[in-house]
Image (cartoon, grey):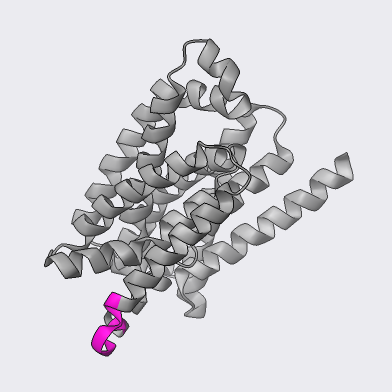
Amino acid sequence: MSGIFSWLQFDFMKLAFVAILIITPLFGLLGTMIVSRKMAFFSDALGHSALTGIAVGVVLGVTDTNLSMIVFAIVFAVLLNKISSRNTANTDTVISVFSSFSIAVGLAILSRGGNFSQYSSLLVGDVLSITRKEILYLLVIFLVTLVFWCLCGNGLFALSMHRTLAKSKGIPVTLLEYLFAVLVALIVMLSIKWVGILIINALLILPAAAARNLSGNLREYHFFAVLFSMFSGVLGLIISYYTNVATGPTIVIIASVLYFATYFYGRKLS
């Protein structure tokens, strides 16, 4: 196999490609709600909490770091959602303090004795290291997300538009907010190993933000968000292979270019 598809001759690239095809639509869908509800700060704090989850697992003697990250992230997401729902003027400050403290505790524990180097790969991620078993986990959460979106998507967007009105229509807004927070926590923690702590929030925000620059309705918003996310992921994987650059940052660069291109294109039309 030669030419532009020569990278498909390697098994690790095939697995990475499949992983990208699963992860990026999830980021595109979730990103639309995160952008609509102005939860960028929430998702960023959640992503950085991965180190704290690992640290808690180390202290408790948990050998499976994924388990400790997921459990901590769910608890962390619920607490952040509770703080966010108060709608007070200093909500962002409280979340920032809470997030900063937990991250500092995680870093302190993991760096004890100079052992942080074994966790540093989580900062930028490595999708090329994904295994077939891990892809199955992603596939399960992908199916769970689709079911959740089909059942609760309309309710989520209703409450993002007007929470009080959605509540008056009988939509269980509090339950949906907590379910969505937990779902974001699960996806972030299951993806962080391959995407990277430092850039996972960018992959959640940029495709949806770019889609918002072009979309005239909700259907277009979803379509462009998923399209931009998948395009950035696949092209970033291919470019990173030929340039020998980390995949995660390459994907973010492409997503950023798409955002600025759609931003200026949208302004030109307006």
Question: For the magenta stretch, what is the residue range?
Answer: 109-116
Left or right: where 110 falls relative to 28: left
Spot occupied by residue 142 in the image (x, y as percentages of width and height): 34, 40
Q: From the viewer's perspective, is residue 84 above or below residue 58?
A: above
What residue sits 68% from the left and 61% below the top?
Answer: 257
State the image quarter where residue 259 is shown: bottom right
Nearer-the-camera pick, 97 or 225: 97
Residue 203: in sight, yes or no?
no
> What is the number of callouts on the image?
0
Looking at the picture, how far across and down is residue 10, in whole percent? 31, 69
Whole-percent x, y for residue 119 in the image: 30, 76
Relative vertical location of residue 167 with respect to residue 67 in this rendering, above or below = above
Specify the principal SS of the magenta part: helix
Rendered residue at 57%/35% (across/down): 223
Front-lying residue, 93 or 251 = 93
Q: State the quadrant of the N terminus.
A: bottom left
Residue 101 in the image: above or below residue 162: below
